[in-house]
Image (spheres, rainbow, N blue to C red):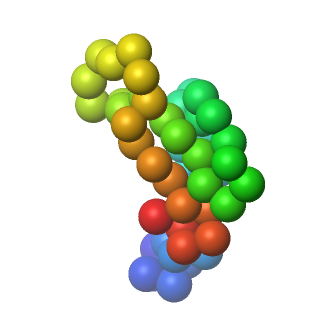
């Protein structure tokens, strides 16, 4: 897989394929609970426009 192919994958779709879904959506970004620790309030921001 090349870097261009990786960049073409939506991070939102990738996280969804790993059963990680946003707690709140705000149009161009979503707030997720961290996949690395157990938390009650979402602190993991994913920008859908920048794919970050």
Q: Position of residue 51 (x, y in %)?
A: 54, 67
**Rendering quarter of residue 9:** bottom right
Name the one closer to the observer, 51 or 7.
51
Looking at the rendered structure, the number of numbered marks drawn on it comes to: 0
**Rendering quarter of residue 21:** top right
Judge whether 45 appears above or below 24 on screen. below
Judge whether 22 appears above or below 37 on screen. below
Q: Residue at x 54, y 61 (%)?
A: 47
Name the one closer to the observer, 8 or 45.
45
Does the image show residue 51?
yes
Q: Position of residue 4 (x, y in %)?
A: 51, 84
Q: Residue at x 38, y 36 (%)?
A: 43
Q: Residue at x 39, y 15 (%)?
A: 40
Judge whether 37 appears above or below 2 on screen. above
User: Farthest residue toward the right?
Assistant: 27
Q: Residue at x 68, y 48 (%)?
A: 26
Does the image show residue 17?
no
The answer to whether residue 5 is left or right of residue 3 is: right
Q: Position of residue 5 (x, y in %)?
A: 55, 77
Q: Position of residue 28 (x, y in %)?
A: 67, 60
């Amino acid at each position: 897989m090349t870097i261009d192919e990786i960049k073409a994958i939506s991070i939102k779709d990738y996280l969804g394929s790993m059963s990680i879904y946003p707690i709140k959506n705000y149009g161009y970004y979503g707030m997720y609970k961290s996949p690395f620790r157990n938390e009650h309030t979402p602190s993991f921001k994913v920008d859908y426009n920048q794919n970050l």
